């Protein structure tokens, strides 16, 4: 099987494509891949490390206000489509897979014009602009959430989940909390705000420190590489000291392994974070980012809240008190936590990678 993968901008669009490549490799050892990314997105740092051949196109996003840069966006898009056609002609793929981001718009549009089968993956509950644009010409559309179904042509959609979930579910974790100076066998609340950390989550945690100092559960806050200094400065300004059972870190490299040992998560409601936590059947307190297109994180979170798989706190309602109240509800009440674990696991699609593979096979 020869597969072109394209997705870019944020990790949320790139990891599903890479997780899919791993699944295909396991099933077809002679599979060949080509990843087409952009010059601007983080895929240029992530994809080359995997050993998958990587090519780049020059594309940029639309600016929300009317501006001359939108003319450049259209010019670059048309140029990228011409270049993509040349690349596809040379590689001769059986299928072209797009996981979102502007670059996948150019690559899949080129493939659709060349009558090559295309499959898109929508990670979120609200369709992204590129996937909406590609839907008409796409052969099939894989969905991360059922809630996105009515935004696409019904005969093309298949609920597959997020292939990253399968990777996480199958992971063996030998992580020990002692590596952070904490104890194994004690309930642990893990708090993080997406991959960059989130100021609102950090501030609420700061306000909650006096209460957390008295709690029997451990607390780990991942403040974000660029935000931890500010957190520590505020901590000192307010004369707060952290109990031995509380740790603040800039970032966690082996997040899935650490998550696997957590009791409850506090998290943004990004599609990848949700795929990971439901793959592990973890109870969660979600704080959707209000700064994303179409407010898609609120809708991602609603899918879980409606299923009884998570609690959600709107960012304006998040403070020390609401955070501690929600954490206590899950960490001090075993019955509630266990009920939520069950619902979280029921939402998780741990064979998402296999489903994605089957979908691709069906169009070739
Ligand atoms: C701000 C923004 O636009 N976010 C979007 C972006 O998510 P983005 O990729 O930024 O964030 P996600 O929540 O989807 O994933 C975060 C990832 O970072 C990892 N992690 C986090 C902290 C840490 O210390 N270590 C670590 O490895 C998590 O395990 C997870 O894999 O694309 C997603 C998929 O389209 C969308 O749903 C999100 O709304």
Image (tube, rainbow, N blue to C red):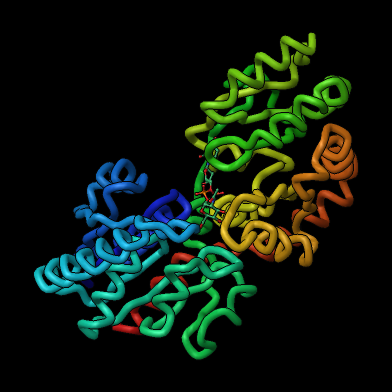
Q: Is residue 209 visible?
A: yes
Q: Which residue is at the far left? A: 90
Q: Position of residue 42 (x, y in %)?
A: 36, 45
Q: Answer above or below: position of 77 versus 286.
A: below
Which residue is drawn at the image coordinates 62% and 40% (left, top)? 193
Total labels: the figure holds: 0
75 vs 158, left or right, is left
Find residue 120 and report its image quarter. Answer: bottom left
Which residue is drawn at the image coordinates 20% and 82% (left, top)? 114
Q: Position of residue 295 (x, y in %)?
A: 64, 59
Q: Position of residue 222 (x, y in %)?
A: 61, 30
Which part of the image, by quadrant, shows the N terminus?
bottom left
Q: Answer above or below: position of 58 versus 30.
A: above
Q: Position of residue 44 (x, y in %)?
A: 29, 45
174 vs 285, left or right, is left
Which part of the image, by quadrant, shows the C terminus?
bottom left
Front residue of this view, candidates 132 and 240: 132
Q: Answer above or below: position of 351 versus 69.
A: below
168 vs 107, left or right, is right
Find residue 330 and report its image quarter. Answer: top right
Which residue is drawn at the image coordinates 54% and 88% (left, top)? 154
Q: Is residue 280 visible?
A: no
201 vs 39, left or right, is right
Front residue of this view, candidates 327 and 77: 77
Which residue is drawn at the image coordinates 24% and 82% (left, top)? 113
Find residue 207 and report its image quarter. Answer: top right
């Amino acid at each position: 099987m020869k597969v072109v993968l394209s997705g870019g901008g944020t990790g949320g669009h790139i990891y599903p494509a890479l997780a899919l490549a791993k699944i295909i490799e396991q099933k077809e050892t002679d599979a060949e891949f080509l990843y087409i990314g952009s010059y601007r997105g983080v895929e240029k740092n992530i994809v080359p490390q995997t050993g998958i051949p990587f090519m780049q196109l020059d594309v940029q996003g639309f600016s929300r206000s009317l501006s001359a840069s939108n003319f450049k966006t259209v010019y670059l898009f048309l140029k990228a489509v011409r270049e993509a056609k040349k690349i596809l002609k040379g590689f001769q793929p059986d299928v072209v897979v797009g996981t979102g981001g502007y670059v996948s718009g150019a690559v899949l549009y080129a493939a659709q014009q060349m009558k090559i089968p295309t499959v898109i993956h929508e990670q979120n509950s609200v369709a992204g602009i590129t996937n909406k644009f590609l839907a008409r010409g796409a052969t099939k559309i894989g969905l991360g959430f059922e809630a996105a179904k009515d935004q696409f042509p019904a005969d093309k959609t298949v609920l597959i989940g997020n292939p990253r979930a399968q990777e996480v579910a199958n992971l063996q974790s030998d992580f020990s909390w002692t590596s952070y100076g904490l104890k194994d066998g004690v309930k642990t609340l893990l708090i993080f705000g997406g991959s960059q950390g989130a100021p609102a989550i950090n501030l609420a945690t700061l306000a909650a420190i006096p209460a957390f100092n008295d709690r029997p559960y451990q607390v780990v806050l991942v403040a974000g590489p660029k935000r931890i200094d500010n957190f520590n400065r505020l901590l000192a300004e307010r004369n707060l000291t952290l109990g031995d059972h509380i740790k603040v870190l800039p970032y966690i490299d082996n997040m899935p392994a650490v998550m696997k040992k957590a009791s409850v998560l506090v998290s943004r409601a990004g599609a990848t974070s949700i795929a990971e936590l439901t793959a592990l059947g973890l109870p969660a307190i979600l704080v959707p980012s209000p700064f994303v297109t179409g407010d898609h994180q609120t809708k991602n979170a609603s899918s879980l809240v409606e299923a009884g798989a998570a609690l959600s706190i709107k960012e304006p309602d998040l403070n020390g008190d609401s955070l501690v109240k929600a954490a206590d509800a899950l960490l001090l009440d075993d019955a509630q936590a266990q009920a939520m674990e069950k619902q979280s696991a029921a939402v998780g699609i741990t064979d998402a990678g296999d489903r994605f593979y089957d979908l691709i096979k069906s169009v070739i």
